Amino acid sequence: MTSPVSQTVSPTALDKLHGFYQPQPVSWIPQTLGWYIVFGILVLLIVWLTIRRIRNWRQNRYRREALRELATSSPEQLSGLLKRTALAAWPREQVASLSGEKWIEFLAESSATPAFREIPGRLIEQIAFASTSLSSEDETVLRDLSKRWIRRHRVQA
């Protein structure tokens, strides 16, 4: 028995075949105006976000410096460090004269946390002006509280 393929294919039939037509590759260049508008908007958005990020980074330089100084500060220096940090963010007239209970309230309100109204946050100014000793646990809590205030305080317009 012979196969039907071998009977129908002859050398002359193969000579009549021509090569396959290959279409042009699809272009990656957008063909419509809409894509150019979308790309333009994306470029503008990226530029705007970059400028905003750089501006934010520059405006928060005082926070980075305060955090570096916090690492080497003694507990007696924490109130002064927070005051210098506040002076970098708020107008001098609003912050420079604050002391005692008003300073504690300012710290609590600007951080939106009541931790400065409680012990050991409440002791931050007493430690700076009097020789009040702290336990190592209270000192750790006070340092963490100060670090949190430096990172998260919000300047109200």
Image (tube, helix red, strand yellow):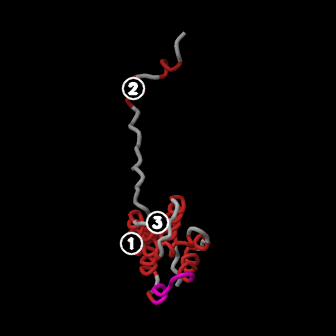
Q: Tag 2: residue type?
A: Thr
Of the numbered discs 2 and 3, the one sitting upstream in the chain is 2
Q: What percent of the width, then of the height, locates residue 93? A: 46, 90
| N-term mark: 2 or 1 | 2
Question: Residue 51 magenta-drawn?
Answer: no
Q: Callout 1: helix, strand or loop?
A: helix
Residue 124 screen position, x and y as percent? 51, 72
* Point 49% across, 18% down: residue: 7
- Say few, some or many: other residues with alpha carbon within 10 Å of mark 3 (under 14 / 14 to 19 / 20 or more): few
Q: Which residue is mark 3?
A: 35
Q: Label 3 to label 1, Cα distance in Å?
A: 39 Å
**Front one among 136 and 86:** 136
Disc nearest the viewer among 2 and 3 = 3
Helix, strand or loop for disc 3: helix
Instruction: Work out whether residue 40 can be spotted.
Output: no
Where are the magenta residues, as a range? Answer: 93-101
Reading the image, the residue beneath label 2 is 12
Position of residue 29 relative to residue 124, above or below, is above
